[in-house]
Image: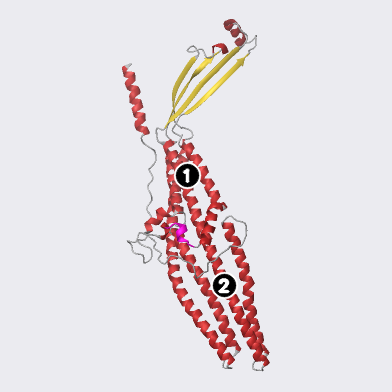
Amino acid sequence: MKKNNIIIYTGLLLALFISACKVGKNYERPSVDLPKQFGTTAFADTSSIADIEWKKFFTDTTLQNLIDKGIKYNYDLQIAVKRIDIANQQLKQAKLLLLPNLNLQVTGSYNRPSDNSLNGLSTSQFLGTSHIENYNANLNLQWELDVWGKLRRQKEGVLAQYLQTYEATKAVQTQLVADIAQGYYNLLMLDKQLLIAKRNLSLNDSTLQLTQLLKNAGEVNLLAVQQADAQKQTTALLIPQLEQSIAIQETALQQLAGQLPSAVNRSASLESLNLPVTLPTGLPAAVVSRRPDIRSDEMALKAANAQVGVAQGSMYPSLTISAQGGLESFKSSNWFNVPGSLFGLASGTVLQPIFNRRALKTQFEVAKIQREQAVLRFRQSVLNAVGEVSNALVQNEKLAQQRQIATGQVNTLHTAIKNAQLLFKSDMANYLEVITAQSNALQAELNLASIQRQQAGATVELYRALGGGWK
């Protein structure tokens, strides 16, 4: 008896020792190639605009209101939030994987065998009755011991999938915030271009009237009047085109905010935008832990790594303990007669796959390949992020230079218009020179507005590329 106890205790200790280990490798973040710094940013500069909350980064109240509505009502974001709810339910279920299954079963049966059958004759002879009744109430327990850590790996994978969904939702929000900001700045650009077109239309009208007076005085011919009128019509054509674009942009913004199409009330202008002057990027290594899309890919990799352990553990023997106990009686009157109706049984089963081992081996190899795919996707997302940040930095730098040049060009062409008009009145310049100066100035002003909008958009893109917008 003593020897048997030693064997039992030894077996239990051995099972506990084995269960302390987990199949598969623990997750380690794969190495990625990162630059030491972004552009000309000092290596010691660890601050980043991505750490700024979006309400502090975007100070325009109209834009803040649009973003706030988008976060609350945008359908893509709401769908992503529902995916979190689903993943949360799956996580709650996964937390119970290590617990045994316990079921309550209550049954009652009635069996009336044939009087001419062997069962019927035996029942009549030994029980003195023509039927058999049986009543059973029991608890049934089944518990698979996590000897190889397969269930713990499965739980680990579900947790990683939950975190992946959570990070993916944050990535949807960062993109939504950026899209709304880009659309709003595009709307302000269209407002300015419409104002430019209307101002130039008034200038073209003055030129047309002056040309008509000079024609009446015999100073110019009909062609000059027609050219001036054509220039006015070209400018006038811009107005309905820009008004159409404004209406479409307003609808797009309202859709992003989860609202029905309507006008967007705004008081700001493209020149009054208050964007950060300095744009610190922080260290490239911080992008890996800051950008939600990269974090989502990393959690997918962690889940794939856990799945390798699950597939490997499925190839090994499984140990299941079963137990059943309760009350049983062939008479309902004695069903709950304790201890006479008590019964119990327990068993342990070791199951080793044999014929389906090839299928389990295939699942294991496929899981390893899928883990390798997840590693590649993770590294690709990091590479894409570094590229996006680098491009946004170049855009901010070069657009600032373009804006300076374009502003000087606009000022030069405004002076040229005034000079051309004075020379035209003094008969020292022809009408074509006036029209050309006005046309060039119009295009230069429209181009400057476009550059200002691109500059604001590049700032938003840098903010998003660094991982800002989800706070």
Residue at 36% of width from left, 65% of height from top?
41
Q: Residue at x 43, y 33 (%)?
A: 98
Residue 278 at what x, y percent from top left?
40, 66
Crowd band around label 2 with a 10 angstrom C-alpha radius: few (<14), some (14–19), many (20+): many
Nearest the eye: 120 or 273 = 273
Residue 49 sits in which quadrant?
A: bottom left
Would residue 213 be found to the left or right of residue 306 on screen?
right
Tag on residue 162? 1
Disc 1 marks a residue whose amino acid type is Tyr
Q: How many other residues sit within 10 Å of disc 1, few (<14), some (14-19) or many (≥20)?
A: many
Identify the amino acid type marked 2. Gln
The answer to whether one can see residue 358 in this image is: no
Q: Residue at x 45, y 68 (%)?
A: 395
Q: Which of 292/276 is in front?
A: 276
Q: What numbered label is drawn on residue 447?
A: none
Please name whichever residue, 86 or 71, is drawn nearer the observer in this view of the structure: 71
Q: Which residue is mark 2?
A: 193
Q: Who comes first in sequence, dot 1 or dot 2?
A: 1
Q: Secondary structure at mark 2?
A: helix
Q: Quadrant of the C terminus?
A: bottom left
Using the image, determine if residue 280 lies above or below residue 214.
above
Q: Which residues are magenta?
A: 52-59
337 displayed left or right of 221:
left
Q: Is residue 32 left or right of residue 336?
A: left
Q: Tell me if label 1 and label 2 are in contact, CB under 8 Å.
A: no
